């Protein structure tokens, strides 16, 4: 009999050996779920670090684009942006 199929009302009629077996089964299930949860948490930490890295890289590229535009176009880009945002 698996843990999911046993209702609380059924526990009164179960032998001590069956109750112990049920307890061990549930404990093993909890340990598996806990290990899975830890794995997922580790994956989240890795993904968060990747996101931070990508965000920093994007910001760096934006600054590089701004610098290259200034080098290529000079103050003309600034005056066009100023006029277009008005």
Image (cartoon, rainbow, N blue to C red):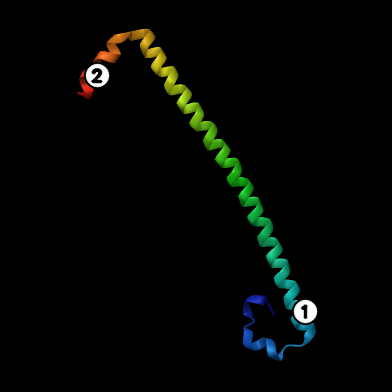
State the residue at coordinates (19%, 23%): 86
Q: Nearer the viewer, residue 57 or 21?
A: 57
Report the number of discs: 2
Quarter of the image for residue 9 reads: bottom right
For the residues marked 1 and 2, what is the alpha-carbon distance in whole angstroms? 77 Å
Residue placed under numbered mark 2 in the picture: 82
Give how far across and how far down residue 37 sits, in percent: 63, 56
Element at label 1? helix
Instruction: Work out which residue is located at the far bottom of the displayed protein and give it.
Output: 13
| Mark 1: few/some/many CA within 10 Å (<14, 14-19, 20+) | few
- Relative to 5, does residue 63 appear above or below in the rendering? above
Is 42 drawn above or below residue 80 in the view shown? below
Who's the residue at 73% across and 88% down the image?
A: 14
> Where does residue 43 sit, x and y in percent of width and height?
61, 46
Q: Nearer the viewer, residue 33 or 70?
A: 70
Please tell me whether mark 2 sits on a helix, a strand or a loop. Answer: helix
Rendering coords of residue 28 (x, y %):
73, 67
Residue at horizontal 76%, vertical 73%?
Answer: 24
Q: Which label is found at residue 64?
A: none
Image quarter of the N terminus:
bottom right
For label 1, the residue is 20
**Of the image marks 1 and 2, the number of the one nearer the N terminus:** 1
Look at the numbered discs 1 and 2 and tell me whether their residues touch, using CB distance below 8 Å: no
Q: Residues within 10 Å of mark 2 (few under 14, many from 20)?
A: few
At 46% from the left edge and 22% from the top edge, which residue is drawn? 61
Compared to 50, does 41 lie above or below? below
* Left-right relation of 79 to 42: left
Left or right, 85 with reference to 55: left
Question: Residue lying furthest right in this view?
Answer: 17
Which picture quadrant has residue 79? top left
């Amino acid at each position: 009999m698996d843990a999911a199929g046993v209702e609380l009302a059924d526990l009164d009629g179960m032998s001590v050996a069956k109750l112990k077996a049920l307890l061990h089964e549930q404990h093993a299930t909890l340990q598996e779920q806990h290990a899975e949860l830890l794995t997922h948490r580790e994956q989240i930490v890795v993904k968060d670090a990747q996101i931070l890295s990508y965000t920093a890289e994007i910001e760096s590229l934006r600054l590089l684009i701004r610098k290259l535009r200034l080098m290529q176009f000079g103050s003309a880009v600034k005056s066009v942006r100023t006029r277009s945002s008005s």
